[in-house]
Image (cartoon, rainbow, N blue to C red):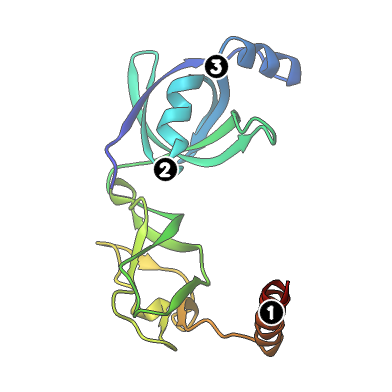
């Protein structure tokens, strides 16, 4: 779990596409903060600091400093430029102490399976419900020593502390297998070997 990221936010008084473009030209990111029955707050976040706070962990818990007052929040939706991948807009949801939130957490495979085997990740993310102050950056899945044919399902994955995984327990997460060589691959290898042998023979005759 990462530490809270603190961002300074200013209140926006202009709205619309033109205002959003002007905000971005000022190296700020337009944002909206809502939740818990509060009226939505239109904010501007410092661009570089926000990018760093959300770059490696989009579920990072944020402490927003708005007009000198602190508010804990979570990024609910991050809109990015499709080419430059910069952040264009952020929807933020208010988080209260002690409440749980539902988020998507990446699956991170650790360890090495048995020699000669490979692994395939069937689920890249898991939906988890977890205390807002204890959101894991990743869910670790160990494949250490697993043999060909081993399948890890959601029910096999250790739950992060205080969390539930909101996915079918029987859903496959990681499959371990031995790479299979197809008949076409074998035929191609044999043809290549024969061609090499023939070329070697012609060279000897010369």
Q: Nearer the viewer, residue 168 or 25?
A: 25
Q: What's the distance in space between the residues labelled 3 and 2, CA to CA?
A: 20 Å
Q: Quadrant of residue 149?
A: bottom left
Q: Is residue 63 left or right of residue 50?
A: left
Could you tell me which residue is drawn at 64 percent across and 30 percent down?
A: 84
To which residue does mark 1 refer? 201
Q: Is residue 206 left or right of residue 98?
A: right
Q: Is residue 46 visible?
A: no
Q: Nearer the viewer, residue 86 or 179?
A: 179
Under circle 1, the secondary element is: helix
Could you tell me which residue is drawn at 57 percent across and 15 percent down?
A: 12
Q: Residue furthest front?
A: 206
Q: Quadrant of the C terminus?
A: bottom right
To which residue does mark 3 refer? 28
Name the spot of residue 6 as percent of width and height, x first: 34, 26
To which residue does mark 2 refer? 57
Q: Is residue 31 above or below residue 124?
A: above
Under circle 3, the secondary element is: strand
């Amino acid at each position: 779990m990462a530490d809270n990221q603190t961002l300074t936010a200013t209140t926006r008084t202009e709205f619309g596409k033109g205002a959003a473009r002007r905000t971005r030209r000022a190296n700020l990111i337009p944002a909206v903060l809502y939740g818990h029955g509060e009226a939505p707050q239109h904010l501007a976040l410092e661009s570089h600091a926000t990018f760093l706070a959300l770059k490696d962990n989009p579920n990072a818990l944020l402490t927003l400093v708005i007009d000198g007052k602190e508010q804990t929040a979570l990024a609910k939706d991050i809109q990015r430029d499709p080419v430059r991948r910069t952040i264009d807009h952020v929807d933020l949801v208010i988080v209260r102490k002690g409440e749980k939130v539902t988020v998507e957490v990446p699956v991170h495979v650790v360890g090495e399976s048995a020699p000669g085997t490979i692994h395939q990740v069937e689920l890249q993310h898991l939906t988890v419900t977890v205390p807002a102050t204890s959101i894991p950056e990743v869910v670790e899945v160990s494949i250490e020593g697993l043999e060909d044919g081993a399948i890890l399902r959601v029910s096999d994955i250790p739950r992060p502390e205080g969390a539930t995984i909101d996915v079918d327990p029987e859903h496959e997460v990681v499959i371990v297998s031995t790479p299979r060589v197809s008949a076409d691959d074998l035929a191609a290898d044999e043809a290549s070997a024969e061609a090499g042998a023939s070329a070697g023979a012609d060279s000897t005759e010369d």
